[in-house]
Image (cartoon, rainbow, N blue to C red):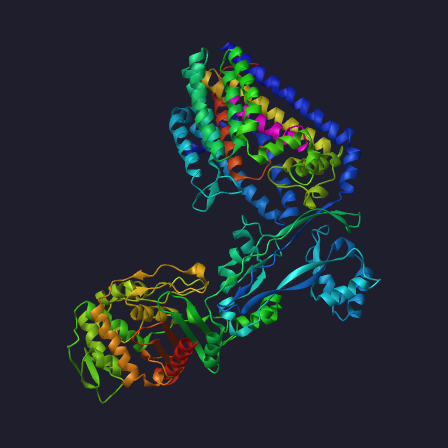
């Protein structure tokens, strides 16, 4: 026990406390925001905020556990964890549907989304795999793509296009960090872009097509799919420079915003805290992302450098997408804003990933690097 | 490694760039175009109004309405518009003028409920008729921030006669809202609270409609932009026959207890009465806390549906089951004769027969006919408790029948295992003796007894009692020997034709059945009768359980006789 506390204390003193500070600030701000957001719709703001706070507590405990166990042990077991999360993703296909998609599994009264935890196992597995088989030639590059396609296809069947997109972005970031020749990555990007019209015509469901069409022109369906975009933009825009103040947002309280405590939490935030609040929020995110990358630069291990690129791409993409859709810059996907959106699985997965990064940071600290 | 580091720095660079783009986008939206959006938010002209669907109606098997919807009106408004005492005074004055008693403090209390969300529309005055609403709206002083909303109010034409079957609806509770969070309920919705209203909630409910309105700055409707009409819930036709149900309620009038009548082949319930009764109409319209407590704390417990949730010792009605178990296990045969001298000494205890002078020598048919206790004491001891429990499980004693009503009790099959768990003591021979005449720990509901007798009447098939065709389940054959069952049925015929149950046979139909008198430590004995008719080709089974009815033969028997006669003649 003594050694446990001693090592925990040492880990905390050695790790990147600025990164952890940013993460905690964002999460706490999120709890307040959820209180305000849910007060309007369900009238149960306290209920949601309390549950989010409880999840935050659990998440921090898990992060500390991951730091003590260390990224080495987890990378060792990466393939098993990957297999387990594929199995869980498969099991969710058999579970009952929630909001038209099968993305939840229930264990003993606690429901969770395996698609969130798969993000961690994908990062672990791909960093291990890519440092063993560096994607420097075409064959290994295709092997890496083959591995990533398994979870992507599993979440696409659910159907959960948002998670599939996140997995692809994570993999792209990791391939980039692993030193894949730029011509391969360029080719991949070009292929992805040219696939959009094909997907649009054949693969996307009507509601997904609608989301993209109203992104181009929200007024084509102002009471249906376009409604969310318009109302969210009004919420953000009316926040102005300084915002309307905590609990004073009318857009969320009058039920104009759909899902205000999850997908559109950023709109609630922007309406109440304004442009200044947003800049502070984004700076917190940016500092956090830089520190994540920094941990990789400090590390002397290949796989760790690739790993942090995965974590950073993940958080970066969900942040940009969630904020961008709130102001109509990007189409609606329904991805949560990391740290702020209501949801235990997402919060827990994020903190576990930060635990990995913190562990890498501690180990890299033996020699000095300058970013 | 250098490649990797430079790639990481490239990624960081891209991220920083994208952050600047985001901040730029936010600047455009929140600072540059802010005025436009502030104006839009301020005059947000869209209001979504959700209106509940009319529930499906409930009818009996002949189309007699049992639950219908009345159109009533509620006055809706924003607490924001009623925030001064003068405004409340004004509204109260107008309501009083039209004979609607709402004082200022009533209104204050209502509005206080939503103090935290004054910008959300709420129900200010509920339950107005069309005439009242029309008069109010025509009043030139009526505040125009308020508007009428048409509401469906549930009414039960049969009232007390079928309240225990139909149940009632009420506003969804916090707990139900949480439990059904994925079914699209919101606060204020009506939901089935008991009875058919609850068990078929998903069928009856329908789909709520939505209307997108354009409103002015005061929230008044200018025009409808888009409307999604509500879809009425599905109607339900019950297997209940209101004629038979009325008769059952009438028969129970001065008693506490229950009557169940059922089709022996399908399990379709024709009548299911529980006494005392309650009226479900006021419950659906919302009663005050005091009235609610009065109903819930009534010592007579009218809300207890005795037909499915009242548990009683089956008493001598259990002897039919005993005969089947003993014959099937070959513990006795038709020719086994047992002598009754008025009692059985077992250990140090004397178990008496109800006829203290004794019945003399009897076989199983005679034992049933005279309801001889000693005959069944001996039969029970010969069969043994383990085989009795084995047969009890085949008849699903101790389990709910699966009737499509909420709150059913499973009774208690008791037995050695149960006694060890409950009392930490071993099952004694004396327990088996008591068990054999349906006394002691074993408990059954009236509907369980009806199901047991239906199986005897239909040749050994356990039906699932149901009130709606959707609740029908294929009967389960428990594999009774036809010859042995025939012996028991002859015994049950003898009960009515020349034995203890003769008063059940005076209504012109050929009834077979069994009386029962259950000892009641709290007062007079309970009277039971279970029977089916016509005895030669049974169609219906009926059970009456009368609390404190003293003798099954004199009180419960004639009730079952009348029920069966009514069913066969209609």
Residue shown at 18%/67% (left/top)? B329
A182 lies above or below A41: above
Instruction: Name the spot of residue B142 as percent of width and height, x first.
Output: 81, 61
Closer to the camera in the image, B218 or B508: B508
Instruction: Name the spot of residue B242 as percent of width and height, x first.
Output: 49, 73
The quarter of the rendered structure image containing the C terminus of chain A is top right
Residue shown at 71%/35% (left/top)? A219
In the image, is A77 to the left or to the right of A162? Answer: left
Closer to the camera in the image, A118 or B243: B243
In the image, is A284 to the left or to the right of B559? Answer: right
Closer to the camera in the image, B177 or B46: B46
Q: Is residue B380 visible?
A: yes
Instruction: Name the spot of residue B277 as percent of width and height, x first.
Output: 51, 75
* Residue placed furthest toward the bottom: B357
Q: Is residue B371 visible?
A: no
The quarter of the rendered structure image containing the N terminus of chain A is top left
B226 lies above or below A148: below
- Is residue B386 covered in magenta? no
Closer to the camera in the image, A21 or A303: A303
Residue shown at 78%/43% (left/top)? B43
Q: How many marks?
A: 0
Q: Which residues are magenta?
A: A308-331
Instruction: Name the spot of residue A24 as percent of width and height, x first.
Output: 58, 33
Q: Main secondary structure of the magenta part?
A: helix
């Amino acid at each position: 026990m003594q050694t446990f506390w001693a090592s925990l204390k040492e880990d905390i003193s050695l790790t990147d406390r600025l990164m952890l500070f940013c993460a905690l600030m964002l999460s706490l701000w999120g709890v307040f925001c959820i209180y305000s957001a849910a007060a309007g719709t369900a009238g149960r703001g306290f209920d949601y905020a309390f549950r989010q706070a409880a999840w935050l507590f659990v998440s921090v405990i898990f992060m500390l556990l991951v730091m003590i166990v260390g990224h080495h042990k987890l990378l060792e077991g990466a393939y098993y964890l990957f297999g387990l999360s594929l199995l869980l993703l498969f099991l969710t296909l058999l579970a009952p549907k929630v909001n038209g998609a099968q993305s939840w599994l229930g264990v003993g009264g606690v429901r969770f989304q395996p698609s969130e935890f798969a993000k961690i196992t994908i990062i672990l597995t791909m960093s291990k795999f890519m440092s063993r088989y560096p994607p420097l030639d075409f064959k290994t590059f295709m092997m890496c793509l083959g591995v990533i396609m398994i979870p992507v296809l599993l979440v696409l069947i659910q159907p959960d296009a948002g998670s599939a997109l996140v997995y692809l972005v994570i993999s792209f970031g990791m391939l980039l960090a692993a030193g894949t020749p730029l011509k391969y990555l360029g080719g991949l990007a070009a292929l992805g872009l040219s696939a959009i019209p094909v997907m649009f015509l054949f693969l996307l469901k009507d509601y997904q097509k609608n989301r993209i069409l109203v992104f181009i022109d929200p007024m084509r369906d102002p009471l249906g799919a376009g409604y969310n975009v318009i109302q969210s933009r009004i919420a953000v825009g009316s926040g102005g420079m300084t915002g309307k103040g905590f609990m004073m947002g009318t857009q969320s309280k009058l039920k104009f915003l759909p899902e205000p405590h999850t997908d559109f939490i950023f709109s609630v935030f922007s309406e109440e805290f304004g442009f200044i609040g947003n800049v502070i929020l984004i700076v917190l995110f940016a500092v956090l992302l830089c520190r994540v990358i920094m941990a990789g630069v400090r590390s002397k291990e290949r796989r760790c450098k690739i790993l942090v690129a995965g974590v950073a791409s993940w958080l970066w993409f969900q942040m940009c997408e969630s904020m961008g859709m709130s102001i109509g810059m990007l189409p609606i996907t329904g991805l949560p804003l990391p740290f702020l959106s209501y949801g235990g699985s997402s919060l827990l997965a994020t903190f576990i990933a930060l635990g990995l990064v913190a562990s890498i940071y501690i180990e890299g600290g033996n020699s000095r690097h300058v970013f | 490694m250098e490649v990797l580091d430079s790639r990481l720095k490239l990624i960081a660079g891209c991220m920083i760039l994208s952050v600047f783009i985001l901040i730029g986008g936010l600047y455009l939206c929140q600072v540059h175009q802010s005025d436009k959006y502030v104006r839009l938010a301020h005059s947000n002209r869209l209001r979504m109004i959700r209106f509940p669907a009319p529930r499906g109606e409930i009818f009996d098997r002949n189309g007699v309405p049992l639950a219908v919807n009345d159109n009533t009106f509620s006055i809706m408004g924003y607490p924001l518009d009623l925030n001064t005492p003068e405004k409340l005074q004004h509204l109260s004055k107008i309501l009083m003028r039209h004979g609607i008693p709402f004082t200022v403090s009533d209104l204050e209390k209502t509005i206080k409920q939503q103090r935290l969300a004054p910008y959300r529309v709420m129900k200010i005055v509920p339950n107005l008729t069309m005439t009242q609403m029309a008069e109010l709206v025509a009043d030139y002083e009526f505040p125009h921030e308020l508007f009428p909303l048409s509401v469906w109010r549930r009414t039960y034409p049969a009232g007390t006669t079928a309240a225990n079957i139909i149940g009632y609806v009420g506003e969804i509770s916090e707990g139900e809202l949480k439990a059904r969070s994925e079914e699209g309920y919101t606060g204020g919705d009506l939901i089935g609270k008991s009875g058919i209203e609850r068990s078929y909630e998903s069928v009856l409910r329908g789909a709520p409609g939505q209307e997108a309105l354009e409103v002015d700055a005061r929230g008044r409707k200018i025009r409808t932009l888009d409307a999604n009409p509500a879809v009425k819930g599905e109607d339900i036709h019950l297997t209940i026959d209101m004629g038979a149900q009325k008769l059952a309620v009438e028969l129970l009038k001065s008693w506490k207890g229950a009557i169940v009548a059922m089709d022996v082949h399908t399990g379709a319930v024709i009548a299911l009465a529980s006494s005392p009764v309650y009226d479900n109409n006021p419950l659906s319209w919302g009663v005050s806390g005091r009235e609610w407590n009065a109903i819930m704390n009534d010592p007579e417990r009218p809300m207890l549906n005795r037909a499915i949730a009242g548990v009683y010792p089956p008493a001598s009605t259990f002897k039919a089951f005993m005969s089947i178990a003993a014959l099937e296990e070959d513990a006795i045969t038709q020719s086994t004769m047992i002598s009754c001298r008025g009692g059985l000494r077992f250990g140090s205890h004397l178990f008496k027969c109800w006829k203290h002078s004794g019945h003399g020598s009897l076989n199983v048919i005679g034992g049933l006919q005279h309801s001889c206790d000693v005959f069944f004491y001996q039969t029970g001891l010969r069969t043994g408790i383990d085989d009795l429990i084995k047969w009890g499980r085949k008849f699903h004693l101790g389990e709910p029948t699966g009737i499509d009503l909420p709150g059913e009790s499973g009774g208690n099959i008791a037995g050695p295992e149960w006694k060890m768990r409950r009392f930490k003591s071993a099952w004694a021979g004396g327990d088996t003796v008591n068990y054999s005449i349906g006394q002691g720990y074993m408990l059954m509901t009236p509907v369980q007894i009806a199901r047991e007798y239906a199986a005897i009447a239909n040749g050994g098939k356990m039906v699932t009692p149901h009130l709606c065709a959707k609740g029908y389940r294929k009967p389960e054959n428990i594999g009774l020997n036809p010859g042995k069952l025939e012996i028991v049925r002859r015994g049950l015929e003898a009960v009515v034709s020349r034995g203890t149950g003769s008063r059940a046979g005076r209504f012109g139909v050929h009834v077979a059945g069994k009386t029962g008198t259950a000892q009641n430590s709290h007062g007079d004995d309970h009277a039971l009768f279970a029977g089916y008719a016509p005895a030669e080709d049974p169609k219906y089974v009926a059970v009456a359980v009368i609390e404190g009815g003293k003798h099954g033969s004199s009180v419960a028997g004639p009730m079952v006789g009348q029920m069966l006669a009514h069913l066969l003649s209609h």
